[in-house]
Image (spheres, helix red, strand yellow):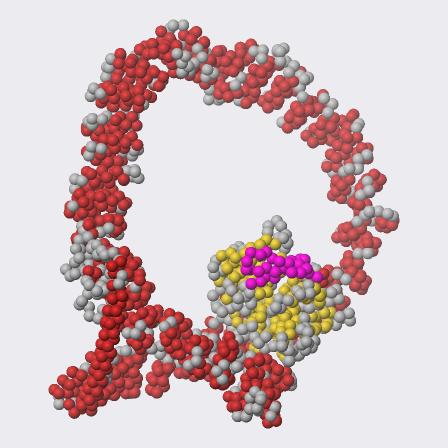
Amino acid sequence: MATPPVTVKEVVSLTSTGVNPQCISFTNLTMESEKFICVRETGAANSVVIVDMANPSQPMKRPITADSALMNPVSKVIALKATVAGAAQDHLQIFNIEMKSKMKSHQMPESVVFWTWIGPSMLGIVTNTAVYHWSMEGDAAPAKVFDRTPNLNGAQIISYRASQDMKWFTLVGIAPGDPSRPSLVKGNMQLYSAQQQRSQALEAHAAAFATHHVPGNAQKSQLVAFAQKTAQPDGSVSSKLHVIELGAVPGQTPFTKRQAELFFPPDFADDFPVSMHASEKYGVLYVVTKMGLLFVYDVETATAIYRNKVSNDPVFIAANAPSVGGVYAVNRRGQVLLMNINEQAVVPFVSGQLKNPELALSLAQKGNLPGAEALVMPKFEALFGSGNFKAAAELAAASGGALRTKETIARFQNVPAVPGQNSPLLQYFGICLQRGQLNAFEAVELAKLVLAQNKKQLLDTWMAEDKLECSEELGDLLQRVDPDMALRVYIKAKANGKVVAALAQKGEFEKMGKYCEMTGHKPDYAYMLQSTLMSNPQGAVQIAIQIGKQNPPPMDPNAVADLFLQRNMIREATSFLLDVLKEDNEEQAGMQTKVLEINLVTFPNVADAILGQGKLTHYDRPRIAQLCEKAGLYMRALQHYTEVSDLKRCCVNTHSIDPQALIEWFGTLSAEWALECVKELLVSNPRQNLQIVVSVCKEYTEQLTAEAIVHLLEEQNSMEGLFFYLGALIATSEDPEMHFKYIEAASKTGQIKEVERVTRESNFYDPEKAKVFLMEAKLPDARPLINVCDRFNFVGDLTTYLYQNNMMRYIEGYVQKVNPSNAPFVVGALLDQECSEDFLQNLILSVRSLLPVGPLVEEVGKRNRLKMLTPFLEHLVSEGSVDANVHNALGMILIDSNSNPEHFLATNEHYDSKVVGKYCEKRDPNLACVAYKRGKCDIELVNVTNKNSLFKLQSRYVVERMDVDLWAHVLADENPHRRNLIDQVVSTALPESKNPEQVSVTVKAFMTAEMPQELIELLEKIVLQNSAFSNNPNLQNLLILTAIKADKTRVMDYINRLDAFNGPEVGEIAVGNELYEEAFAIFKKFDLHLDAMKVLLECLESIERGLEYAQRVDTNEVWSQLAKAQLAAGDVGAAVAAYIKAGDSSDHGDVIDVAKRCDDYEALVSYLVMVRKKVKDAKVDTELCYAYARIDKLSDLEEFIATPNAANRAVVGDRCFDEGLYEAAKVMFISDSNWGRLASTLVKLHQFQAAVDAARKANTARTWKEICFACVDEGEFRLAQLCGLNIIVQADELEEISEYYQIRGRFDELLSLMEAGVGLERAHMGIFTELGILYAKHRPEKLMEHLKLFSTRINIPRLIRACEEMAAWKELSFLYVAYDEFDNAAGVMMAHPDAWEHVSFKDVCVKVANAEIYYKALSFYLEEHPTQLVDLLAVLTPRVDHSRVVDLMRKRNHLALVKPYLAQAQTNNLQAVNDAVNELCIEEEDYEALRNSIDLYDNFDQISLALRCESHELIEFRRISGHIYQKNKRWKQSVELAKRDGLFKDAMEACAQSGDKELAESLLKYFIDENNKECFAACLYTCYDLLRADVVFELAWMHGLMEYSMPYMIQFMREYSGKVDALIADKKDRNLEKVEAEKEAVKEQMNQNLYAQLLPAALPAPPMPGMDGMSPGGGAVYGAMPGMGSPNGMNGMPPMGMPGMGGGIDAGAKDFEET
């Protein structure tokens, strides 16, 4: 079978990446290019999933809510669309995902129906009326481009495309098909020209733009291709592909319009194209249809190349893949398929299968495809032989690689040039350049020609146009002419070694490192570094940095640093090490220590700057701490020491430590150590260190705890420290003890003002403790004590203290200025101290109006000295005081003295009634009542009257007060005096009242208190005893209502005696309280007939009394009311008679219902005849028809139907049918032309043939089904099948028909029906499926044939269930395969041997999705078919986990069975596979295979294998063991094993490879001990580089082996004499350079001296405090030495300009930054 010309492969399954399958649809998924797929997931949490096609296994998910999302075709930019709530508008936004920023946004004035990226920076937006373009660059809003044509109105837009030059646009939409072919979707297209600003409406489902170069034209032609599928008037379908040229360029040969047929198979009759894409790479068109068909056509000729179904699921979107020349498509299952031209097969396919060599050659030329050699070679030979070299060159250039070879170039080179013309070779190159890029050997040959003619600029042009394929040979050719161009060529050719050499030569080391990292190239850095060190130290640093950046580094960083240090290049070594150590890895601890050590010893300021950066954390901290202390970097030493003794020793050097840094350092210590160091500071120099100690304590109070700090300061007796520390602490502390300590410290240090401030402002000290301390301290200033006592209410103690200490001035000052409001308490305390009244009166008068009178009166009254205040109070009254306290005091004095208190209580307006009344209660209750009444103190008055039995006074007050709350209080159940009060109210207070409002309030109060008996008693007193309120309607109503609730026996008497009450309302209330006779009497008394009738009928339920009352009243309303009651009682005849008397037809609905319920249709007919005269209602006519049917008056019924009427005949017919009145129903259905119901009626009458005829007229599924079921039940199977064929074509009814037949055991008849249904034109999937199920149940021998014939037309899942139930395993596996359920198919085959077949199982197994099935299959084959296991593994090798397979086989002990598979799987270099292969090799004693395995594949447990081979009986396996030890650098074990087996050659080679001098010397000694002289000599040769000459000479001399060591000696002397010669020559060169340098220095110094007189004298840098120009070790500071800052002891140190220690930390940091 020929290889397909198109490859189709699944690139990714979106569902396997976690995308919700429900969201894989046209509305949720977009694919704008081959780079990204964007899926909107909707649900409880909306999100957008972005699948990068370069890494589809790791999709990016973002919580974004949008209606549409589009990824930019080239960058990670996303466009989002969301509908504006409440408006037909859409909000558009563009976001940059990488920068996490919004780029643009815009709100469209109308809804966007479709949008897409038409370029890298341009969005095409389609609305219902127009098309807009929106650039993501700048701030411009979307610009309108053109309006939509009418043919797209109502269409769903599915595509919008733009040509490359943005001059042509296509807009495609789909719409429902024509009525003649509704299942065929209609496609419409609009083609718009931007230059002409004109549109053309076309019919098309898909379109694409392409370009094509017509031979002889200078420019490419712009083409548009579109596919259409339309229904023709004759019912046929036309499918066409059109390719036409757009905007033909004048003067050029036009492109010939092409047209081709799109052939759709019969099963795809309603399929249509959904997407079309052009491949510029191959010059073909891809057309993808909805049902998964792929068409491939040639653009130039519109010739069909390929057609096939590529997807079993519908395809809804596709995207071009220009990088590979193919197209991506996504189907509903979530498969992303890549369809592409098969380069190896397409040309042979077209020429062989399609018999179209011209097209094959054209494809080969356009796509540079192989396979056209046989087509072009004869023609080329003919042209070349005839001398037509130009045509031969054109043919070779267009051959697609078939003739573009070295041989062709050689043939053209051998042709002599014609004078005056270009040589054939140049013609060939010119034609190739016009067509595209030259290949590698063509580019080299052309470059040789061009460079020979000195026309390099042509190469520049061709390189810029990418016309030359780059190669290392071409770069070598250009290296001599243009190194930069050669470098570009090397890079494109991926000649890594040449690129690195070129970059190093240019000094671009950073670019060199990036290139090596990017390409993975590993140059010889050691050689490069050593060769650069002396000539370019900074370049060497850059190379070293590049070495350090690589992972793993090609050289040991320590070795690199040593190279710098050996040459005393401290700066360079530091710079390199810092770059290497920037990641701060723990394994680099030694290098971190090294870089700090060399700088602490030489340049401490640089080391300080390095430590200050904090980028190194893993160095030897104790070692660095000691060096820092020696260098005078005490702060750094403190940061590194870990012992408290070291910390205490260093921290006291505060003169050399920055105070702020020292304070911050304390924050790194534990609380205990910090306190010890603070104590050390206080002990060493308390005056100097006090400020630092206080600052530390302030800063770290929380860590050290205030208690510990205070204890420490108190222990050291540092009251000043305590004062300063607590002064800052109390601002934030709420600890009472701290505040008290501060007061105490301030007092002891003489800070009286601070004591006064704290006692005044602080809220947290213990007042009692502070008061006692201040009293004991007896400060000369009493203000702190005054503050404490005043704030915390110790006024009495304060007054006593001041009085006893004769500090009367502070008493007066306190009362007058501090707190006059406390003057009463001061007066009271002074009275207790028996102070003189004169002083007290003067003190009171000095305060006057500021003095609170109430507390003063209270304090003085407690001590029975109230009269003392009389003059003061009278003085206040005379001044016009209205203070209630003043007047209260005067009133109390008058009451006590009995000086006409009644007058004062009645006339004074300013006293407090409650206070004075309370004062009077025990002295005179009547005076208390006067005071309470004046102040309306209700509760107090009630209490005092209750207490003193003054109920008459209380009742009059309560009635006159008219206060609802007061009434509620006195009438409460809890009031034990309520009865006494009620008696006084009824007998005295209320009869005396003439105020209606008082009466009303009183009655309401009784009602509110729910006291009906008392209320009745009260109301009878008012209403029935001829009072002024006897005829009050409200009171009469209230009396009756109260009686209704409380005493029903009095109601009838009140009704008869009273006439002014409200009859209707009272009557309703009586009804509500079930007093029906009383209610009837009220309604009758007030002539309310309807209400009275209602009481008789509904409440008393007496229709007889109602009839009697109706005859007496004789009104229509009453008769109608009576009729309703009779109807409710079921007396239809009496009710009808009453309705007729009333002439009432309004209740005809109720009458009809009751008549039907009572089955009294005779009376109903007479009533409906009367109603029909008054009412024209369809219901009346309908019920009349039904009544005629019920009383069997069919003649009257037919006569009524014949007359005009509004009866619902269908309803009457249905009711008659339901009740078995089939003859009447037949009449109704015939009159209504209801053929369906007529058919049902005829079935009931057993008239089956007539029923079938009626069913044909009805033609409904229900009717056919009913007749079919009836015929089956009656055995009329011919008629039943006739009916059934009309039913089963409707899928929803099929299952019911099948169940009906099967329940009745009519299986053969059902099979006949289904087999007949298969041949129907309208046969659907359900029929084929149901027939398959029936075959599975009743005819299993026919099932497989049925499946093979109709596998595409059955419902596979349903039939799968049926096959499972019936155990049809072979058929079940066939169905699973057809449904792409390969996992289940494999499971069935393994579970049921009769369904298994090896070839089919292999085909199924490679397609399963669940990897676990692979391993189940392996287990199955091991148990059932072990001989075919290897064949199965051959197809599963790319899919299985080899480690798991090996583990499975090892557990089953069948590794040898799968040895061929292991050999194939070993190419993956997996440990499990390698171990298994090695194990088999050992078992089979195949040492050659074992050595080959371990050399090719190194991923295995090497040490275990080595140990196993070491004990093997065969020596070759022991040699392999030594070989493994060498690979793992276990040289000693390898040598010992070789010595044990006598394999001395292996031992010597292992030593030579190890590079271990000691191991080589030990082997040499071994040979001497064994007296193996030959091996001794061989070892000297093999390990020459490792053996030290002195050791060799000594051993040879001592053991008489000089003659064996002589070759070694000769070689050694020759090597070292050569080195000495080289050193002497180098020294001469350096001496010459030194002389020249000295001459230049003298010359430069002389030039500088010319300007020395103009410059000021330089001042030396000041030394560091305490250093005095000496280093910490006692030597001179390097900065103070002459020269450039290098110590004399460091020979060869270059003048790097390192600053001295006098430069300070800043200078060191600056110098470090420059380094």
Question: Who is closer to the viewer here, 467 or 780?
Answer: 467
Q: Can you tell which quarter of the image residue 863 is in?
A: top left
Q: Indicate the position of residue 720 as horizontal and vertical percent values.
A: 20, 38
Q: How many labels does the image show?
A: 0
In the image, residue 412 sits, relative to residue 1138, either above or below, namely below
- Can you say whether 398 is above or below 1237 in the image? below
The residue shown at (15%, 90%) is 1602
Identity of the residue drawn at 61% across and 87% down: 391
Query: Quadrant of the rendered structure where residue 1265 is?
Result: bottom right
Which residue ends up furthest to the bottom in the rendered image? 385
Q: Quadrant of the N terminus?
A: bottom right
**Region in magenta:** 121-149
Residue 126 can be seen, yes or no: yes
Q: Position of residue 118 (x, y in %)?
A: 59, 65
In the picture, measured across the screen, residue 236 lies left or right of residue 957, that is right
Give coordinates of residue 859: x percent, y percent.
31, 17
The quarter of the image holding the C terminus is bottom left
Q: Foreground: 657 or 684?
A: 657
391 drawn magenta: no
607 displayed left or right of 543: left
Left/right placement of residue 713 relative to residue 1385 reads left
Tell me where residue 32 appears, x and y as whole percent.
57, 66
Decide if residue 1311 is in sight here: no
Tell me the residue at 28%/38% (across/down).
730
Q: Is residue 122 magenta?
A: yes
Residue in the picture at 62% in, 66% down: 166
Q: Nearer the viewer, residue 122 or 1201?
A: 122
1681 vs 1445, nearest the viewer: 1681
Give above or below for 1229 relative to 1375: above
